[in-house]
Image (cartoon, grey):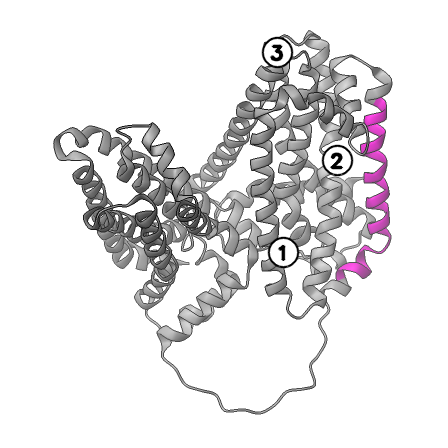
Amino acid sequence: MNKLRALFVVQLKAMLFSFRPGGRSKKRAASGAGILALMAGLACYLSVSYSILFSAQLSEIGQLPLLLVFMPVMAVLVGFFFTLFAAQGVIFGGRDNDLMLALPISSFTLMLARTLALYLENLVFTLFVILPCGVAYLIYGGEGGIWFCLRLLFAVFFLALIPTCLSLICGFVLAWCSSKISRWALLSTLLYAAFFLLLIAGVFRLNLLLSRLDSQAAAIQRVFNGVGRPFLWLSQGVCDGSFPALLAFGAVCLLPFLALVWLFARRYKRIVTGLSARGARSDYKLGRVAAGSRRRALLSKEARRFFGSPIYLFNAGISLIFLLLAAVAALVARDKLLAVLDLVEGLPVLPMLALWVGFLLSMAAITASSISLEGKQLWILKAAPVPCTTLFTVKIGFQLLLCLPCLVISVLCFGAALSLSAGQLLILLWTGGAVSLFTAPFGLFVNLCFPKLDAANDTVVVKQSASAIIATFGGMLSVGLAAGLYVLTWRRLGADGAVALCGGVFAGLSVLFFCLLWTKGQQLYQNL
């Protein structure tokens, strides 16, 4: 028991401080706590938004208990999404497996400690999704009082077991595929793209469900009478106080979890060593090595890193994909879009487009993870005869090579769809280009200030590191402040002039961060 507790504490600290950059200073520890608070706030915001929308409609048709069916499903999906790659990297592909497996502890103890840490992470996400849902239920007329709250907390502890089981199964499958399939990087990118398309389709279906909830409530309940019956048991146990239903829900969650942990723990050492094994090739051929420039080699390295890691590609580059999809959709649905604009007279089209384009470009925080992803191989770059300014230029240039073509294509599509003038197209290009020129050095400077070189896997760096989150939300905040500047200046300068001024502000900020990189940034890089 003492060994299990000690291992659990180690895994728990690794999970809690995965947001924190390297080092032990109080300042960096505080930044990690701040990132945790930010993610908790975002989870609460998501839950509050959908809980209020669902509660308002369900209370009108007398089906408020269905709220405790919809939101637990959302909690399971959110937890599964955030912990899938953690299960692959921490439980089945941890970098400390050689050390852990050599310790005088059983495989079952090690597997259970890591799984409990994964469960705790799911529990945090589940709590921040379900608790606002319970508050909304009571506000909109739900009964139960303090006993309802106690039953809800009891159910949450079991609900978090569902995404944990799903993450364990899918994490094992992903770890097996990555170790056995030679072209897994390309295949995983395609699978990740399909997953995002399904996610987008699910969001659209959810919004469609909200608009037709009054007529679809009975049909939805019939659907959950099948494979979704555990969620109905949760609703009945929490809302109606049915103790047998609550026990049935707990048993359905707990028993598969225990069986899955026991099954993996029996052969955990063999599974982990088998996944880490690599076969030796015997088809090596001699060939001529071509020489090239240092910049080209570094740029090729950045491209292989970006396109070879699905988690990096789709987290740092998903906004660029959305930008292209929105532009193509505007061009395809041109007639419908113009009809909507005709109904809303006086709508400032150019400022709305500039806000949308700038918002998506600000989310492309590619450079915000590029230093951290070097990890333990950073010494190779530092030992190479490459000045750090050249490295900075290549990393910034790679992000611009991705952002600027997407900007040009989207602006041309929006211009053709909305019949923008040549001057408006130039202003839109100027503003979007200035945002890109700002976010690239800004993200790189933030990553130098908050590096995460000891991450267990790419997921921690791209999704949970302080630099990635600060750069992403910092860029979004800067676009929001630019929108405020537009509101203050558009009466004097006009819509086009105010948008151009915002672009000038971003251009000035880009010069500022380039200067910071070439001075303070070099010192930070040398100290890594």
Horizontal side of 426 relative to 353 (left or right) equals: left
Picture layout, residue 220 above or below residue 313: above
Spatial distance from mark 3 to mark 1, Cα to Cα?
41 Å
Residue 443 in view, yes or no: yes
Circle 3 — which element? helix
Badge 2: few (under 14), some or many (20 or more) residues near its Cα, within 10 Å?
A: many
Answer whether labels 3 and 2 touch (C-beta < 8 Å): no
Q: Say which of marks 2 and 1 sits in front.
A: 1
Q: As shown in the figure, which amino acid type bears the numbered disc 3?
A: Glu
Q: Which residue, given by chain and number where applicable, does mark 3 sit on?
A: 60
**Residue 268 among those drawn in magenta:** yes
Badge 1: few (under 14), some or many (20 or more) residues near its Cα, within 10 Å?
A: few
Q: Please give the label number shown on residue 191.
A: 1
What x and y, as percent, mark residue 430?
A: 23, 50
Q: Which residue, given by chain and number where applicable, does mark 2 sit on?
A: 161
Residue 456 in view, yes or no: no
Image quadrant in which you'd find residue 342:
top left
Q: As shown in the figure, which amino acid type bears the numbered disc 1?
A: Leu
What x and y, as percent, mark residue 304?
A: 50, 67
Which region shows up in magenta? 247-272
Spatial distance from mark 2 to mark 1, Cα to Cα?
25 Å
Q: Nearer the viewer, residue 161 or 415?
A: 415
Badge 3: few (under 14), some or many (20 or more) residues near its Cα, within 10 Å?
A: few
Answer whether labels 2 and 1 touch (C-beta < 8 Å): no
